[in-house]
Image (cartoon, rainbow, N blue to C red):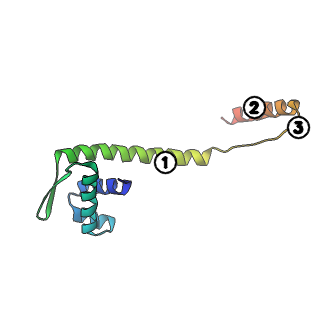
Amino acid sequence: MDFEKLKMFCKVVEEGSFQKAAESEFVSQRAVSQMMKKLEDELGLKLFDREKNKIFVTPVGRDVYIYVGNMLQKFSVNVSALRYESTTKQRLICGYFSPFDGALLREKLYGFLDKKM
Protein backbone atom coordinates (compact mmCIF):
# COMPACT_ATOMS: atom_id res chain seq x y z
CA MET A 1 0.00 0.00 0.00
CA ASP A 2 1.32 3.44 -0.83
CA PHE A 3 0.31 7.05 -0.55
CA GLU A 4 -0.55 7.30 -4.24
CA LYS A 5 -3.27 4.67 -3.90
CA LEU A 6 -4.62 6.34 -0.78
CA LYS A 7 -4.62 9.77 -2.41
CA MET A 8 -6.32 8.35 -5.48
CA PHE A 9 -8.91 6.64 -3.29
CA CYS A 10 -9.77 9.98 -1.69
CA LYS A 11 -9.94 11.62 -5.12
CA VAL A 12 -12.32 8.92 -6.40
CA VAL A 13 -14.61 9.34 -3.39
CA GLU A 14 -14.58 13.13 -3.77
CA GLU A 15 -15.19 13.03 -7.54
CA GLY A 16 -17.72 10.21 -7.35
CA SER A 17 -16.28 8.34 -10.30
CA PHE A 18 -13.15 6.62 -11.53
CA GLN A 19 -13.31 8.56 -14.80
CA LYS A 20 -13.49 12.02 -13.19
CA ALA A 21 -10.68 11.13 -10.78
CA ALA A 22 -8.59 9.84 -13.68
CA GLU A 23 -9.14 13.04 -15.68
CA SER A 24 -8.21 15.26 -12.75
CA GLU A 25 -5.02 13.28 -12.13
CA PHE A 26 -4.14 12.84 -15.83
CA VAL A 27 -4.18 9.04 -15.81
CA SER A 28 -6.41 6.50 -17.51
CA GLN A 29 -9.68 5.33 -16.01
CA ARG A 30 -8.40 1.77 -16.24
CA ALA A 31 -5.33 2.67 -14.15
CA VAL A 32 -7.54 4.20 -11.46
CA SER A 33 -9.84 1.18 -11.46
CA GLN A 34 -6.86 -1.17 -11.09
CA MET A 35 -5.41 0.94 -8.28
CA MET A 36 -8.69 0.80 -6.38
CA LYS A 37 -8.98 -2.96 -6.89
CA LYS A 38 -5.42 -3.43 -5.55
CA LEU A 39 -6.20 -1.20 -2.58
CA GLU A 40 -9.31 -3.22 -1.79
CA ASP A 41 -7.29 -6.44 -2.04
CA GLU A 42 -4.53 -5.08 0.22
CA LEU A 43 -7.00 -3.87 2.83
CA GLY A 44 -9.27 -6.87 2.53
CA LEU A 45 -12.24 -4.49 2.39
CA LYS A 46 -14.84 -3.72 -0.24
CA LEU A 47 -14.63 0.05 -0.69
CA PHE A 48 -16.93 0.42 -3.71
CA ASP A 49 -20.05 -1.18 -5.11
CA ARG A 50 -19.63 -1.24 -8.86
CA GLU A 51 -22.45 -1.10 -11.38
CA LYS A 52 -22.31 -0.43 -15.09
CA ASN A 53 -20.69 3.00 -15.44
CA LYS A 54 -21.41 3.85 -11.79
CA ILE A 55 -19.72 3.35 -8.45
CA PHE A 56 -21.02 3.76 -4.95
CA VAL A 57 -18.88 4.09 -1.84
CA THR A 58 -19.71 1.37 0.69
CA PRO A 59 -20.26 2.28 4.36
CA VAL A 60 -16.83 0.80 5.12
CA GLY A 61 -15.43 2.85 2.24
CA ARG A 62 -16.82 6.03 3.81
CA ASP A 63 -15.15 5.14 7.12
CA VAL A 64 -11.86 4.43 5.36
CA TYR A 65 -12.18 7.74 3.48
CA ILE A 66 -12.54 9.69 6.73
CA TYR A 67 -9.60 7.87 8.33
CA VAL A 68 -7.34 8.15 5.28
CA GLY A 69 -8.25 11.81 4.74
CA ASN A 70 -7.29 12.64 8.32
CA MET A 71 -4.10 10.62 8.05
CA LEU A 72 -3.01 12.31 4.79
CA GLN A 73 -3.78 15.74 6.20
CA LYS A 74 -1.75 15.08 9.36
CA PHE A 75 1.10 13.70 7.27
CA SER A 76 1.09 16.81 5.08
CA VAL A 77 1.07 19.13 8.10
CA ASN A 78 3.94 17.22 9.72
CA VAL A 79 6.03 17.28 6.53
CA SER A 80 5.44 21.03 6.21
CA ALA A 81 6.51 21.54 9.82
CA LEU A 82 9.65 19.48 9.27
CA ARG A 83 10.51 21.45 6.13
CA TYR A 84 10.05 24.71 8.02
CA GLU A 85 12.08 23.45 10.96
CA SER A 86 14.92 22.26 8.74
CA THR A 87 15.18 25.68 7.07
CA THR A 88 15.03 27.73 10.28
CA LYS A 89 17.33 25.76 12.55
CA GLN A 90 21.03 25.99 12.01
CA ARG A 91 23.90 24.45 13.87
CA LEU A 92 26.89 26.47 14.99
CA ILE A 93 30.11 24.70 15.91
CA CYS A 94 32.85 26.71 17.65
CA GLY A 95 36.24 25.60 18.79
CA TYR A 96 38.26 27.05 21.65
CA PHE A 97 41.67 26.51 23.23
CA SER A 98 41.10 26.68 26.95
CA PRO A 99 38.28 26.21 29.48
CA PHE A 100 38.35 29.97 30.01
CA ASP A 101 37.82 30.59 26.27
CA GLY A 102 34.94 28.09 26.28
CA ALA A 103 33.23 29.78 29.23
CA LEU A 104 33.64 33.22 27.69
CA LEU A 105 32.34 31.99 24.34
CA ARG A 106 29.28 30.33 25.91
CA GLU A 107 28.51 33.46 27.91
CA LYS A 108 28.68 35.69 24.83
CA LEU A 109 26.70 33.29 22.63
CA TYR A 110 23.93 32.70 25.15
CA GLY A 111 23.67 36.45 25.78
CA PHE A 112 23.44 37.07 22.04
CA LEU A 113 20.85 34.33 21.50
CA ASP A 114 18.72 35.49 24.44
CA LYS A 115 18.53 38.98 22.87
CA LYS A 116 17.49 37.49 19.51
CA MET A 117 14.67 35.36 20.97
Q: Residues within 10 Å of mark 2 (few under 14, many from 20)?
A: few
Q: Which residue is mark 2?
A: 111
* Left or right, residue 19 beside residue 71: left
**Identity of the amino acid at label 3?**
Phe
Residue 80: mark in rendering: 1
Query: Cβ–Cβ below 8 Å for labels 2 and 3?
Result: no
Could you tell me residue 65's position as x and y percent?
Answer: 27, 47
Out of 9 and 38, give the one closest to the viewer: 38
Which badge, 2 or 3, is on the more N-terminal residue?
A: 3
Quarter holding the C terminus?
top right
Give the Cα separation between the discs numbered 2 and 1.
31 Å
Give the Cα separation between the discs numbered 1 and 3.
40 Å
Could you tell me residue 12's position as x and y percent?
Answer: 25, 57
Q: Which mark's residue is nearer the viewer, 2 or 1?
A: 1
In the depicted structure, whether residue 60 falls above or below residue 18: above
Could you tell me residue 5's position as x and y percent?
Answer: 33, 56
Out of 13 and 48, give the one closest to the viewer: 48
Which badge, 1 or 3, is on the more N-terminal residue?
A: 1
**Identity of the amino acid at label 2?**
Gly
Residue 28: mark in rendering: none
Q: Which residue is mark 3?
A: 97
Q: Which mark's residue is nearer the viewer, 2 or 3?
A: 3
